[in-house]
Image: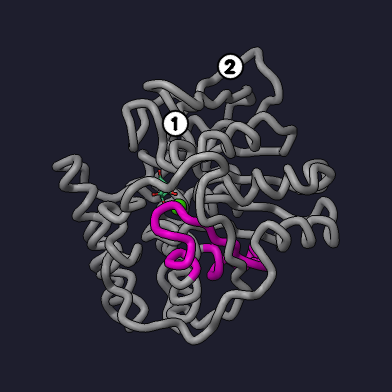
Amino acid sequence: MKKIIFDVDTGIDDAMAIAYAVNSPELEIIGLTTSYGNVAVDEATRNTLAVLEKLGKRIPVFAGSAKPLTRGNREGFAKKVHGEDGLGNVLDFEPAASAETQSAVDFIIEQVKELPNEVTIIAVGPLTNLALAIQKAPKIIGQISEVVIMGGAVFVPGNTTPHAEANIFTDPEAAKIVLSSSLPITMVGLDVTMQTLLPRDKVEAWRNSETGEFFADMVGFYLDFYESVNPGIGGCGLHDPLAVGVAIDSSFVKTKYISVEVVTEGKEDGRTVPNPDGKPKIQVCTEVDAPNFLDHFLKRVPVSK
Ligand code: BDR
Ligand code: CA
């Protein structure tokens, strides 16, 4: 079992990724850390607790960054994509549990120090928490077993601007700190996540349990957004779930070992630029076995209490 710290900005695909992760026996989620991104940090924390409650799982949640390292928040966050509540406007209860008092950044540092070379971090929001953790405690860089990031668009166009993917665009300075560190990173970007689409008929098939209704309504909102932006696309991107899939089984993807630089200004702000000769190098996912991954995901999500 891999010990996982799961850094999320819960959002609809984050919620699916949480369900996938907690239902995967290969992973032991030792804590979820939250940040702003799709919604404000307080909303992301609430959503994370609510999704865990729906799934009947008790895992500690640690609230993290409220804004990017050096910039302000994006107006309206990504609520057009994920709904006013971040969960497709289906959230109709306040979670019973609360976040822990320790901060996300301190939790990451503490756990890596206590479990050297044992912790995998899956980060599927802006990279602010991780950047702050390695700035505060640089020694942990050499003690983290693996970092799987959903972010970037290395050889394909962006989704927030023609050049930039949302998680990197939201805090390019944090992404630069993380991607220029010597962390052992696998980058699961739009290069592969836009090939792993979840079709509507699979989502509708979830409607046979209470949990399934919640997930089907929520993901229905996400599907509507994808269709509105790209008519005929035939599904929504399984961005964050694919990062979980890669942490479970890296054979879902093929990678290139290259360096990735982050643009932090101008019209290409937030772009992730490949540099085959640069350093440090990371594993950039370039191909995915989408049918196999989708099959694996659908066997585990959603699962009733
Ligand atoms: C990423 O951006 C967020 O909106 C999603 O949750 C995902 O992490 C996709 O670009
Ligand atoms: Ca996310």
Residue at 43%, 70% (x, y): give it: 47
- x, y (%) of residue 294? 40, 53
Q: In this view, does 93 lie above or below 107?
A: below
Front one among 235 and 131: 131
Q: Does the magenta stretch include residue 228?
A: no
What is the quadrant of the N terminus in the image?
A: bottom right
Residue at 36%, 39% (x, y): give it: 194
Residue segment shown in magenta: 21-45
- Colouring convention used in this rendered image of the protein: one colour
- x, y (%) of residue 132? 67, 47
Furthest residue to the bottom? 96
Do the residues bearing badges 2 and 1 touch, measured as CB atoms within 8 Å? no
Residue at 58%, 75% (x, y): give it: 99
**Side (left or right) of 96 relative to 298:** right
- Using the image, tell me which numbered label, if any, was put on residue 275: 2
Secondary element type, mark 1: loop
Mark 1 — residue? 153
Front one among 173 and 5: 173
Front one among 17 and 81: 81
Q: Earlier in the sequence, mark 2 or mark 1?
A: 1
Compute the Cα span from label 2 to label 1: 13 Å
Q: Is residue 290 above or below residue 85?
A: above
Classify 10 Å Cα crowding around label 2: few (below 14), some (14-19), many (20 and above).
Answer: some
- x, y (%) of residue 192? 44, 37
Say if residue 138 shows up in the picture: yes
Q: Is residue 69 above or below residue 199?
A: above
Q: In which quarter of the image is residue 182?
A: top right
User: Tag 2: residue type?
Assistant: Asn
Q: Does the magenta stretch include residue 31?
A: yes
Secondary element type, mark 2: strand
User: Tag 1: residue type?
Assistant: Ala
Question: Label 1 CB, ligand 1: below 8 Å?
Answer: no
